[in-house]
Image (spheres, rainbow, N blue to C red):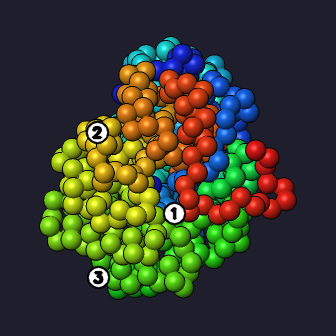
Amino acid sequence: MYSSRRTAHRPAAARAVPSVLLALAACSASTGGPSAGSPVPVSTVAVPFADYHQHLMSPGLVELWSDPVLPTVELPEALDRVLRTRERVAGTSAGGEIYTEDAQVVELSPWVANWIRGRSAVEDLVSRVRPGARFVPNGYGIEGSSAWIATTVFRGDGPSARAVANFLFVLRRTADGTWRIAAESASLKPPSITAPVIAEQLVARLDEAGIRQAVVLSGAYGFASDSSAGPDEHARVRAENDWTAAQVASYPERLVGFCGVNPIRDYAVAELERCASALHLRGLKLHLGNSGVDVRNPAHVEQLRHVFRTANRLRLPITIHLRTPDPTYGREHSLIFLEQILPEAPDVPVQVAHLAGTSPGYSSDEAMAPLAEAVAAGDPRTRSLYFDLAGNVTPTISAETAQLIARRIRQVGTERILFGSDLDPASSPRREWGTFRGMIPLTDTEFRTIADNRLPYLPPGRFRTGSPPR
């Protein structure tokens, strides 16, 4: 999660989306129902027994992974007047009044990124924009009769306000001395976590989906990346694992906690042993990309082998985000994992996250292919190898990608595929399962097998009163 921020075909429903702000409305909507890419209602299909790829968010991780907005700047009155008018005209037919005759504007949504030109076309576009956005200026400049304003777009008020996009306006002062918008471009901001996510909230989301259990993967490795490491790194890693352990302990029948470490740190094995003995965490989460691991570096491989051996000795299952920061990541990296690292943990389940890639979307088939081929060939090293598809299936994947994912699933066998939804602030386990069902061409029997996959380390089947029936 959060190792890299996110072609796709355009769904039929997307063709009616007129602008970036209508897309923003979808981003800020409630996550209770199925997504636009989930034509199959969740309530009518098999429900996963467990979500094998979930996270909580401690106050420390919120601070570490938050997406800060630049400070607000005060605009000259004339420029500020343009910005406030731009807010006011959204959804009305008066939009053309603040644009130049030759204005050029990007029509942007998750599926559209086209320039349109001319005051009349821009006015039509603005008339279809959902009102209610606030443009907060973060920078500006004026040179003669030209100016620019960089802004962050917010929706909502007070603590619930969210930054949903960045807008850049280019202005021109016309002959009558009035500033008007000559060009306007925007980029959507990925939803970010702005407040802690605790066990109680996760369990509520599981209840909403009818999912019995979840595997909670500690994000402690986040404090041990090259970008965040400091003199208190080890203490912060320990504190995050402590926090995760305390959270999952409040729902022992519903949540399973995995320890997080950077495998190439010299304290990794000691922290793993502490997680198992003192914290009673039941597994290990490794994130090679976040941890700066290079599997083509023999020293890194040896460290990984040591960590795998330790996890195997402690009988701790492993979930590994295999993708590394290497831009050439692909087949070679997976083969090193298969041949040199995986054999060190023959007695525990090893779960390759995100179908050997990252999320959202599916873009690492070169890495997934050799692992799938090894499983299909009966390679004994893959005896306890599993794959989760957290974040790989989105409403905008192409039909070709959906077919490829289905082919890989069948190649490794549905009994090795684990449902996972990750911690996506714009989604939910219910929505992720609905999207998977709606987008991937598998049979009902295949979906049922995936839903029913239950690894042996999950708690026994006793659940608190109020848990959803199955």
Q: Is residue 462 above or below residue 261?
A: above
- Which quarter of the figure has residue 265? bottom left
- How many marks on residues? 3
- Looking at the rendered structure, the secondary structure element under dot 2 is loop
Pointer 2 with pointer 3, Cβ within 8 A: no
Between 458 and 67, the one nearer to me in the picture? 458
Q: Nearer the viewer, mark 2 or mark 1?
A: 2
> Which is more N-terminal, label 1 or label 3?
1
Residue to which mark 3 is pinned: 266
Residue to which mark 1 is pinned: 217
Q: Residues within 10 Å of mark 2 (few under 14, many from 20)?
A: few
> Which is more N-terminal, label 3 or label 2?
3
Q: Is residue 141 visible?
A: no
Distance, label 3 to label 1, CA atoms, is 21 Å
Residue found at x 39% / y 38%: 412
Residue 150 x %, y %: 43, 46
Residue found at x 50% / y 13%: 120
Between 406 and 112, the one nearer to me in the picture? 406
Q: Is residue 60 above or below residue 27?
A: below
Residue found at x 28% / y 43%: 374
Residue to which mark 2 is pinned: 377
Residue 260 x %, y %: 45, 70
Q: Residues within 10 Å of mark 3 (few under 14, many from 20)?
A: few
Q: Is residue 436 left or right of residue 173?
A: right
Distance, label 2 to label 3, CA atoms, is 36 Å
Pointer 3 with pointer 1, Cβ within 8 A: no
Q: Is residue 47 visible?
A: yes
Between 127 and 386, the one nearer to me in the picture? 386
User: What amino acid is found at the position of numbered circle 1 in the picture?
Assistant: Leu
Q: Is residue 287 above or below residue 48?
A: below
Between 180 and 154, the one nearer to me in the picture? 154
Distance, label 2 to label 1, CA atoms, is 30 Å
